[in-house]
Amino acid sequence: MSSVRGYLSGFLISGLLMLAATYMAATHAFPPFGLLMVITVCAAIATIAQTYFLLHIDTAEHNIWNTVSLVLFIPLFVLTIGLTWWMFSQLYLHTMPAMAGMH
Amino acid sequence: MSSHGNTVDPKKTVLWDAEYHGHDVISTRSLGFFLYLLSDGMIFATLFAAYGVLSYSHNYFGGPTPSQFVHPWYTFTQTVSLFLSVLAYGMGMAAMKNRNRGGLISGLLGALVLGVVFLCLDVHDMTDLARQGITIATSGGTSAFIILTQVHAAHIFFGLIWILVMVAQVSSKGFTTDTVGRLLSLRMFWHLQAIIWVFVYVFVYLWGYIS
């Protein structure tokens, strides 16, 4: 349970970041790869802000095991997506030479 | 937790308790439910992985791609309604902290209405796509796109049912260990949906629109 101010900060930070990401994507403000980098940074900061302000995940001792399990969860999440994507990108690269490099 | 900062003498240390002293019910349940939610996060990991490998241009088989059927500002209104719903829930929890039952129920009802708005916008979007002939059967790419976004929408649907149940329970039972514990679990569930939505919105809708 936390203060009204914490919930408002979480809402404002993530809302403004999503607004910025939407604006840049809708106007194609940068070349695709640059845009991907910028919106990834927006998503990362919004996620961290929501985790801290909304889920109250921090290093306070009363909920340290929530924090530990979330931190240990992140590599599982990243590896599941990353390794699957990598395997299939290699598969496409080697089995569909005409389509190599297409996204 | 009590061992922090104490020097341990191996000859005198008691390794287990002879009796059961009981647990803090709410914090034990909260941790258990949080671990369940993380395993739910792994469902999204597999769906994101499936979308990742099925979003190459050949996966659309020459058919429509998200860059043609995603409307960033339309989906942004979904983002705002979900974030506002989460904010309303948070305000309700802040009211609960002050033992304000009316404030909590208004917060829950606000979260419910905004969640329904989110779901209506999603259903409208999906029926619009279906009218254009874009369904899960169109191509591997649209299949992964629709399944991932609709699994998230299904989470919102069940969250809304849970919010309704909690409105009824708080109205009839008031603040008990059970209802407060459930409200804390629902808070984690509801806020986690907003966090997952950030990923769905940025990497599926926005990135799909750009590429």
Image (spheres, coloured by chain):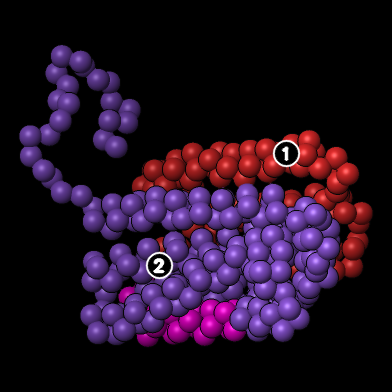
Chain colours: A red, B purple
Residue B21: x, y in percent? 13, 45
The chain to which mark 1 is attached is: A
Q: Which residue is mark 1?
A: A91
- Can you say which quadrant of the picture contains the C terminus of chain B? bottom right
Q: Is residue B103 highlighted in magenta?
A: yes
Q: Residue furthest left?
A: B18
Residue A7: x, y in percent? 54, 66
Q: Is residue B3 above or below residue A84?
A: above
Q: Which is closer to the viewer, label 2 or label 1?
A: 1
Q: Which residues are magenta?
A: B97-121
Dot 1: within a 10 Å radius of its alpha carbon, few (fewer than 14), some, or many (20 or more) residues? few
In which quarter of the view is residue A94 placed? top right
Residue name at image x 53 percent, y 40 percent: A76
Numbered badge on residue B186: 2
Residue name at image x 28 percent, y 25 percent: B6
What whole-number distance in Å separates the C-alpha atoms at marks 2 and 1? 41 Å
The chain to which mark 2 is attached is: B
Q: Nearer the viewer, residue B149 or B37?
A: B149
A38 sits left or right of B113 in the view: right
B179 sits left or right of B21 in the view: right
Q: At numbered mark 2, what does the secondary structure look like: helix, strand or loop?
A: helix
Q: Is residue A31 above or below residue B159?
A: above
Q: Residue flagged by tag 1: what amino acid is it? A: Leu
Q: Residue flagged by tag 2: what amino acid is it? A: Leu
